[in-house]
């Protein structure tokens, strides 16, 4: 059966959620469905312009009243598009966009699926949005989350029968060609408090592995860039901690020896799955609940308590100094990912999701 599907996301800037959306878009297009992406962002970063509806209503609000006015404009425009286009499925991503999609669809006969991509219990989206999420999420037809912890939390205000766990998918790298690795500790993500890069820099400093030629490379940009660079300068780690901005991560996965996820909270970060698919051993924090579906502590990853730079530094030392452990962890993680993160299996879960409503 050919379906007409709207995918809604606030921004199409580079990120894990945007990659998931683009992969779903391509998959459903290949199956013959009519698929379009709706975004509020003014920036066009995807080569799908003819299948993109850009509302050009970025959230640049400077105060509460402007924010309310801006979001009412978003709801008005989004509702008109939904109303005037006969699309029978709407799939929305990320908390604030999900709320706007639900309100925009009130009284209309479209099947609405919303998808949580983070840890909704810990994610700081603001007090008003948290209340609105608790009020409106129950009116979606289906609610998906990419961690079982998120599903459990959502059950507090959404009927359990509406909630489904759909893990993130990954396209595994099957190339076993050996590439010379450099002594690089790799981290990727937006330079934001959530990602815990301040803790990671402290841990790298405590580990002292830079004395043996190791470097910490961080890919990403964000509001904490100046703060983090100042921290590096104060710790006298310039030329040892390198900020590379937004770069294609693939070359860095290939030449790095360890990947670290230092986040204070997460759903299931795509960068972690990509690192595992490239056979990189990983260190994660115990707040990354989505990753625990794929990885087990001391078997297929090493796990540090969140915000604990001393504990994280010891794991960094342990992995940096043990080549056999790095091989063991990366091989075990890759096997788990092959079994649990297979894109065909997970895309079929999305298909069955659509069929059920």
Image: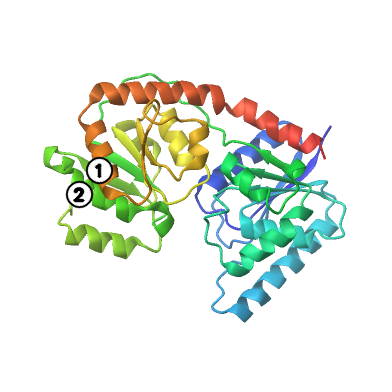
Residue most toward the top? Answer: 176
Which corner quadrant of the image does residue 23 belong to? top right
Q: Residue at x 58, y 57 (%)?
A: 11
Q: Is residue 178 left or right of residue 50?
A: left
Which corner quadrant of the image does residue 279 belong to? top left
Label 2 sits on residue? 205
Q: Is residue 240 left or right of residue 90?
A: left
Label 1 sits on residue? 313
Q: Residue at x 68, y 56 (%)?
A: 98
User: Above or below — where is 168 with respect to 83?
Assistant: above
Residue 18 position, x and y percent, is 56, 47
Task: Pick the residue in front: 191 or 285.
Answer: 285
Query: Element type at marker 2?
Result: helix
Label ID, residue 152: none
Mark 1 vs mark 2: in front: 1
Q: Earlier in the sequence, mark 1 or mark 2?
A: 2
Residue 296 position, x and y percent, is 44, 29
User: Above or below — where is 139 with respect to 180?
Assistant: below
Which quarter of the figure is the N terminus placed in? top right
Q: Is residue 150 left or right of residue 160?
A: left
Task: Pick the residue in front: 28 or 258.
Answer: 258
Do the numbered discs 1 and 2 sit on residues whose CB atoms are within 8 Å? yes
Residue most toward the front? Answer: 156
Q: Is residue 300 left or right of residue 172?
A: left
Which quarter of the figure is the C terminus placed in? top right
Which corner quadrant of the image does residue 174 belong to? top left
Task: Pick the residue in front: 348 or 135.
Answer: 135
């Amino acid at each position: 059966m050919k379906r007409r599907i709207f995918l809604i996301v606030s921004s199409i800037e580079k990120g894990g959620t945007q990659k998931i959306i683009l992969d779903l878009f391509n998959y459903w297009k290949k199956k013959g469905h009519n698929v379009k992406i709706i975004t509020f962002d003014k920036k066009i970063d995807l080569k799908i312009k003819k299948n993109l509806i850009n509302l050009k209503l970025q959230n640049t609000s400077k105060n509460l009243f402007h924010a309310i006015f801006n979001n009412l404009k978003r709801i008005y425009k989004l509702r008109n598009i939904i109303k005037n286009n006969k699309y029978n499925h709407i799939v929305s991503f990320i908390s604030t966009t999900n709320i706007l999609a639900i309100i925009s669809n009130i009284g209309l006969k479209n099947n609405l699926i919303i998808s949580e991509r983070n840890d909704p219990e810990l994610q700081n989206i603001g007090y008003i949005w948290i209340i609105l999420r608790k009020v409106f999420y129950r009116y979606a037809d289906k609610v998906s989350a990419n961690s079982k912890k998120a599903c459990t939390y959502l059950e507090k205000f959404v009927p359990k029968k509406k909630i489904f766990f759909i893990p993130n998918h990954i396209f595994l790298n099957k190339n076993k060609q050996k590439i010379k690795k450099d002594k690089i500790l790799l981290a990727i993500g937006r330079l934001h408090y959530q990602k815990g890069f301040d803790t990671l820099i402290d841990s790298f400093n405590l580990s002292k592995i830079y004395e043996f030629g190791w470097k910490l490379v961080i890919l990403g940009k964000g509001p904490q860039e100046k703060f983090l660079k100042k921290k590096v300068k104060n710790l006298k780690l310039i030329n040892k901690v390198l900020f590379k901005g937004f770069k294609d991560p693939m070359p860095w996965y290939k030449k790095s020896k360890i990947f670290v996820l230092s986040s204070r909270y997460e759903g299931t970060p795509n960068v972690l799955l990509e690192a595992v698919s490239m056979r990189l051993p990983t260190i994660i924090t115990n707040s990354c609940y989505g990753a625990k579906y794929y990885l087990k502590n001391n078997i297929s990853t090493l796990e540090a308590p969140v915000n604990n730079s001393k504990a994280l530094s010891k794991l960094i030392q342990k992995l940096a100094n043990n080549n056999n452990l790095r091989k063991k962890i990366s091989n075990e993680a890759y096997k788990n990912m092959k079994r649990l993160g297979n894109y065909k299996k997970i895309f079929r879960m999305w298909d069955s999701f659509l069929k059920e409503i």
